[in-house]
Amino acid sequence: MRNYYFYDRLDSTMNEYMRLKEIDNQALCVCANTQNDGIGRHDHIWLSPPGGLWFTFDLELNQNIPSFALYAGFCVHKCLESLFSPLKGRLLIKWTNDIILDNRKLGGILCRYQSAKKTYTIGIGLNTNNEIPQELGKFGAISLASVLGFPVSNHWLCKNLIYSLESHCQTDLEDYSYLTYCNNHLFGKEKLALFETGGLHLKAEIMSIDPSGALLIRKDMGEFTNLHTGSILEILN
């Protein structure tokens, strides 16, 4: 049983989720039409224009899995392709936590594990019916409605996405088959990219995702290494 809270405007769905969790012990989902102070990775600002789908929910899990953000990306990718046939073959998963449509950012995912409660708190933001500001995303951005030609029900899509994470959890997390799926739909594969990791920038070729969820890259001298944290800033070729 999950309780859903829908708002027109919030500071952030993650903050409201934490406030509500103090008084509601059920599984929760907090969804907003827009956020004033959306929270992204490393506490970066998450731009959340009116009309998009911005929500936070929880998922019980007995262990912290380093590649869980990729599992979430797998579920979101698979759900969107199953719901909207025009998206098939056009969606990619950007390591570690973005969904890319036609080489532009459709959405992002933020996952935090609370070991004391054995629970993941998951924030998902998708450009659905919102207009796209010029500054939204380093890779540019794109909305579902602009591709599909019609507005999307955010409440309906929110519930379908949560169901996707819940329904795949028992099997795909156990055998890590989601990593194979992510590799098959990996954004920037075999392309030269600019990365940020540990405050440093480096250029390398994107190769694949390894069994731990790290990104295997090849540097300019042919050296292979794994990135466990960081971001892809730009595709260079």
Image: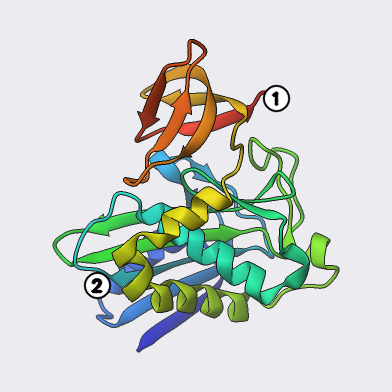
Q: Position of residue 148 (x, y in %)?
A: 81, 67
Q: Position of residue 169 (x, y in %)?
A: 36, 72
Tell which residue pokes out farthest to the front in this image: 222
Cα gap from disc 2 to disc 1, whole angstroms: 49 Å
Residue for badge 1: 237
Q: Is residue 130 left or right of residue 155?
A: right
Colouring method of the image: rainbow
Residue drawn at (32%, 55%) of the image: 112
Q: Position of residue 210 (x, y in %)?
A: 38, 42
In the picture, the disc for residue 39 is none
- Residue 63 against residue 101 in the figure, above or below: below
Among the 4 quarters of the image, the one containing residue 9 = bottom right
Residue for badge 2: 22
The secondary structure type at the circle numbered 1 is loop
Residue drawn at (17%, 67%) of the image: 117
Q: Position of residue 225 (x, y in %)?
A: 38, 25
* Nearer to me, 170 or 55: 170
Residue drawn at (50%, 25%) of the image: 195
Quadrant containing the C terminus is top right
What is the crowding at mark 2: few (fewer than 14 residues within 10 Å), some, or many (at least 20)?
Answer: few
Of the two numbered discs 2 and 1 in the rendering, the one whose residue sits closer to the viewer: 1
Residue drawn at (42%, 17%) of the image: 223
Quadrant containing the N terminus is bottom left
